[in-house]
Amino acid sequence: MNTDLHHAEAFLRTEGLSLPALPAELAEQLRERAPGIYSTRELAASPYTLEVHVGELLRCASPADYAVLAIDGHGSQSWAFHYYLVSGPLALFVQLPWGGAYTDVATARAEIERVLAWARPLPQRLAELKRQGRLAPEQKLLVVLTRFSEPRWAWVQPPEAATDEITWQPPAQMLSRIDAELTALNEKQHT
């Protein structure tokens, strides 16, 4: 088993956080790139620069699968937990407050764990929809779940460099709305 994966899990455990779900092939590729930063590939930008990573995905015609787990930031308040997972029909970018002088640890931990529990079944749900032909070959569910910029989600087919061409869904009740849409897609398949 991947020793860097064990290190990532131990690192998160010391913070009182659980290891997010990772597809087996990505879990084996996970490497420590810097203290507190684990990724399946070299990173051209810090995980803290979320929009750089989202923009990269939208510009790439055929984005390769990858994962990032990190606690990264700067200064006394601008620190975040990062979980980026680009895998098949899913592009999930989670950036939530963690650490920093004014962050309530219990509240932050509860939000992160709630999001990780919600995200855990997403890859399988989307893979099943794709297998059933409910998704176009390159279609991805793009979820940007952050407290540092505008949270949003959309169905995309990279490359879509011009974000004004994307129909972003409003962030209100984002997780439940995504669940409802995936359920509706699944039910359409069975009717």
Image (cartoon, rainbow, N blue to C red):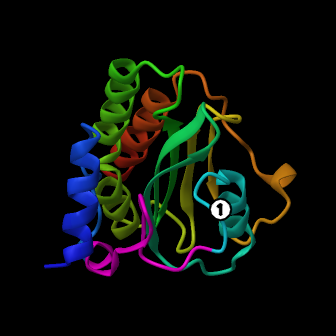
Side of 35 where 106 appears, left or right: left
Side of 90 where 150 appears, left or right: right
Residue 74 is drawn in which quadrant? top right
Q: Is residue 1 in sight in this rendering?
A: yes
Residue 51 lies within the magenta run: no
Q: Residue at x 61, y 81 (%)?
A: 62
Residue 162 position within the rendered picture, expressed as x and y whole percent measured from the top left:
86, 60
Residue wearing tag 1? 53
Q: Is residue 191 in sight in this rendering?
A: no
Query: In the rendered structure, which amino acid carries the disc numbered 1?
Result: His
Q: Secondary structure at mark 1?
A: helix
Q: Which residues are magenta?
A: 25-43
Q: Residue at x 20, y 78 (%)?
A: 2
Q: Nearer the viewer, residue 69 or 33?
A: 33
Q: Nearer the viewer, residue 12 or 65?
A: 12
Residue 139 is drawn in which quadrant? bottom right
Q: Residue at x 42, y 46 (%)?
A: 185
Residue 59 position within the rendered picture, expressed as x and y whole percent measured from the top left:
75, 71
Residue 33 vertical position relative to residue 9 in the rendered view, above or below: below
